[in-house]
């Protein structure tokens, strides 16, 4: 018979799966553990200093980026070791790039570069119209061949999903297939997820947490503009 701890873990896992099931197979949350929960707690704490905020945010970003890279396609390969033995392994298929949604998405760029040294990164700037308050794209710069690439779209905080919806629309205007886009995110609300997946059902989303309250102060704290 399993211990009470094992039973609690099983119940917790089942609850997590039940919560995620309503979002469909393209919504993924990185596996929760105490380290990740601590990072999320520090980022949400109003008493966290700016230097600590950036340090721990970078740690969480790295974990999310690493898991996002697992969603990219690999191909089998065989290499020769220094001892002359063959080793059957894997390598990334060519044709990946990153796109950050300015400005908060730029916080995730270094984490991607730390994992993929030569990866190309584009940018999208989405702003709210002063009169209508609707999101509109004011700037976009991508690799010329982005239509043939897998795209890691980086945006750390999603409360409504409107900014991401506009950004994905621009990528699709540049002939990027919806199924080739992977959204890398730190925190998102259930309404934001529902809004995005109802608009783009083939888009893949990877986050560290789905919670009703998102830390919307992230960009200001990370870049020291609060």
Image: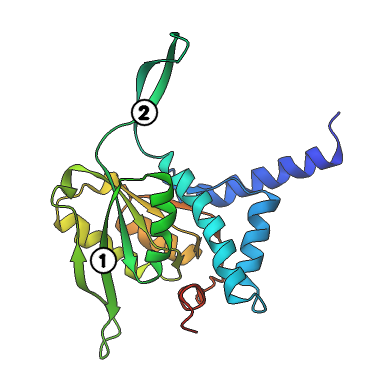
Q: Is residue 181 above or below residue 72?
A: below
Q: Quadrant of the N terminus?
A: top right
Tell me: 67 left or right of 151: right
The residue drawn where x is 45% and y is 15% is 82
Badge 1, how many Cα within 10 Å: few under 14, some, many 20+? many
Tell me: 181 left or right of 12: left
Tell me: 153 left or right of 140: right
Badge 2, how many Cα within 10 Å: few under 14, some, many 20+? few
Q: Which mark is residue 91?
A: 2
The picture places residue 56, in percent across and down from the top left corner, at: 59, 62
Q: Are marks 2 and 1 in contact (CB under 8 Å)?
A: no
Which residue reaches farthest bottom?
A: 131
Tell me: 127 left or right of 204: left
Q: CA distance from mark 2 to mark 1?
A: 29 Å
Q: Earlier in the sequence, mark 2 or mark 1?
A: 2
Question: How many discs appear?
Answer: 2
Secondary structure of the residue carrying tag 2 is: strand
Residue position marked by numbered label 1 in the rendering? 124
Task: Give 56 or 51, whichever is nearer the viewer.
Answer: 51
The picture places residue 139, in percent across and down from the top left corner, at: 20, 71
> Hey, which quadrant is residue 91 in on the image?
top left
């Amino acid at each position: 018979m399993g211990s009470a701890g094992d039973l609690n873990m099983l119940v917790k896992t089942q609850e997590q799966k039940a919560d995620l099931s309503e979002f469909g197979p393209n919504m993924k949350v990185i596996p929760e553990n105490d380290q990740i929960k601590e990072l999320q707690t520090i980022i949400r704490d109003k008493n966290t200093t700016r230097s600590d905020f950036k340090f721990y945010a970078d740690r969480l970003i790295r974990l999310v980026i690493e898991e996002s890279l697992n969603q990219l396609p690999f191909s089998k390969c065989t290499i020769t070791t220094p001892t002359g033995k063959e080793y059957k392994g894997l390598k990334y298929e060519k044709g990946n790039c990153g796109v950050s949604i300015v400005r908060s998405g730029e916080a995730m760029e270094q984490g991607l570069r730390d994992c993929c040294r030569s990866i190309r990164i584009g940018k999208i700037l989405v702003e709210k119209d002063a009169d209508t308050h609707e999101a509109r794209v004011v700037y976009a710069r991508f690799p010329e061949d982005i239509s043939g690439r897998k795209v890691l779209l980086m945006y750390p905080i999603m409360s409504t999903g409107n900014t991401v919806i506009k950004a994905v629309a621009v990528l699709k205007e540049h002939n990027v297939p919806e199924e080739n886009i992977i959204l890398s995110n730190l925190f998102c609300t259930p309404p934001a997820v529902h809004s995005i997946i109802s608009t783009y059902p083939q888009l893949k989303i990877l986050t560290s947490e789905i919670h009703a309250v998102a830390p919307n102060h992230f960009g200001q704290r990370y870049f020291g503009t609060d």
